[in-house]
Structure formats: C-alpha cells, structure tokens
C-alpha cells in the first residue's frame, strides 16, 4: 500500500507538471542551455559540503543568461532516510530587454531544505522541500520549492553493475505574494556513472513561468563526489 501511494503521488505530480508546461505551447518558445558542476565532499557518512556551479546561455556555450555559484552543508540522519541542508548562492541574471539590449542584475539567496528518500521498486525516489530567502533588485521575497525525483536503473536486471539510469523530475516553485505561482519545471533524461565518484547526466527541461512564459533547456550535469556517490 505504501509503495502504491508513493507511485500514485509521483504519477500525479508528473502529470500535473506536464499539463502546466503544455499550457503555453502556443506561445513563442525559447531554447536555452544549461551546464552544471556539482561537487560534494563527505567528512563522514552524516556530514557533507556541496559546491554548485551553473552556467546558462541563450546559445550553446555563448550569449550568457545566468551564472550561479553556491555552496551548502548537509546532515544525513544515520537511522532515517532524511537529510537536512542549508546554503547560500549568488546569481547574475542577464535578460534581453530588446533585440540588441540586455539588462544585468544580481541576486543573493540563502535557503534551507529537507530531503526525504525512499525506494519505488528498483528505483530511487526523493522529495525535496526547500525554503528560499531571496534579495533581488526589486526587493526581498520568499519562495517555496518542492522537487519530486525518480532515478531508474537501466540495463539487464542480471547485470551486477548498471551504470546507466533514467531521470524523471518535477519541481513546483511558489512565491509569497498575491499571485503565488512562480514556475513549474519538468525534467527527463539519462545519466551514466563512470565510477563511485563521478557521474554525468543529460536532460531536457521544460519550464512554465508565471505569465505563460514557456522555455526549454538542454542540460548537462557533472556530479563529482569526494567520498561516496549516492546510490
């Protein structure tokens, strides 16, 4: 019953995400690109620090859109599939205000999060609840984020080590204001584990933002764990 409930929750969330992102199909879409490095250092099985570097562009590897640099500390409970984390990030955002004109702004944010992990048959399921405090040029605001992730091993079941895995994610973000909806993101892709410390993920992400702005991203994420790689 517990597995069926988790399965139903994941399917419903994914369907809602697909529906939300499809609402703006008639709007002009803009293809963007996203590369990311995530490096984690484990002091022991419970404590770790993670650095996160992101570079998002309007064109492949050029015409910058967003730069992101952040770090977080995380504590993983020994006898429960729960992690607590907190971190800081700085972003620059470069937006087009006209065909040839751009506007560059900066953002500082701190955040706190709870991650709950579980299993769905042979897949790994996780729920991440995050609270952000953001300082932007237009002022301060608070944002809530909920990310539902599913990681599915790929390849023959009899294979002892299966380096390939599938990725499905859905994230909803809301802001404390009169119109709370900020954006919804749906991710899909595959990952490859080179060894217990290094993995590369390639994904397609569709984002529906407030006001009906619909965008797509190609994503490549390099995950580097100094100590252990999550299973």
Image (cartoon, rainbow, N blue to C red):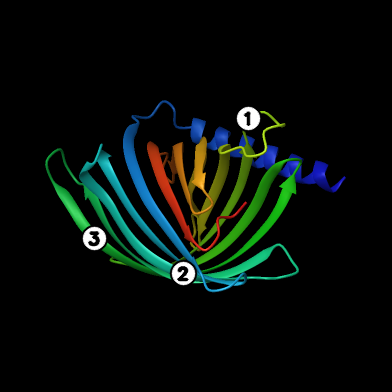
Residue at the top extreme, as displayed = 26
- Say whether marks 3 and 2 touch (CB < 8 Å): no
Q: Is residue 206 above or below residue 135?
A: above
Q: Earlier in the sequence, mark 2 or mark 1?
A: 2
Task: Report whether residue 214 is seen.
Answer: no
Which of the 4 quarters of the picture holds residue 141? bottom left
- Judging depth in this view, the residue of 154 and 64 nearest the camera is 154
The residue carrying mark 1 is: 155
Report the residue at 67% width, 28% height from top: 156
The residue carrying mark 3 is: 105
Which of discs 2 and 1 lies nearer the camera? The answer is 1
- How dense is the environment of label 3, judged by Cα within 10 Å: few (below 14), some, or many (20 and up)? some
Report the residue at 27% width, 43% height from top: 57
What kind of element bears circle 1? loop
Which of the 4 quarters of the picture holds residue 136? bottom left
Q: Residue 103's x, y, as percent? A: 19, 53
- Judging depth in this view, the residue of 175 and 69 nearest the camera is 69
Give the tally of numbered discs.
Answer: 3
Which of discs 1 and 3 lies nearer the camera? The answer is 1
Residue at the right extreme, as displayed = 1
Report the residue at 62% width, 69% height from top: 45
Q: Earlier in the sequence, mark 3 or mark 2?
A: 2
Q: Does 24 sit left or right of 54 as displayed?
A: right
């Amino acid at each position: 019953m517990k597995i069926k409930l988790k399965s139903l929750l994941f399917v419903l969330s994914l369907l809602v995400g697909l529906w939300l992102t499809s609402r703006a199909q008639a709007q002009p879409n803009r293809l963007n690109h996203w590369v990311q490095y995530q490096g984690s250092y484990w002091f022991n099985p419970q404590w770790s620090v993670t650095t996160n570097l992101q570079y998002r562009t309007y064109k492949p590897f050029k015409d910058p859109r967003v730069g992101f640099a952040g770090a977080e500390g995380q504590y993983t409970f020994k006898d429960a599939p729960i992690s607590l984390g907190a971190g800081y990030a700085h972003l620059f955002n470069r937006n087009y205000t006209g065909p040839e004109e751009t506007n560059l702004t900066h953002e500082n944010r701190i955040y706190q999060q709870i991650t709950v992990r579980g299993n769905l048959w042979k897949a790994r399921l996780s729920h991440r609840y995050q609270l952000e405090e953001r300082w932007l040029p237009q002022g301060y605001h608070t944002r809530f984020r909920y990310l539902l992730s599913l990681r599915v091993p790929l390849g023959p079941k009899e294979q002892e080590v299966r380096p390939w895995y599938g990725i499905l994610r859905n994230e909803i973000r809301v802001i404390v204001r009169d119109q709370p909806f900020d954006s919804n993101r749906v991710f899909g892709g595959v990952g490859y584990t080179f060894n217990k410390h290094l993995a590369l993920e390639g994904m397609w992400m569709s984002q529906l933002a407030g006001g009906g702005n619909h965008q797509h991203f190609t994503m490549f994420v390099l995950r580097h764990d100094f100590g252990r790689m999550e299973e």
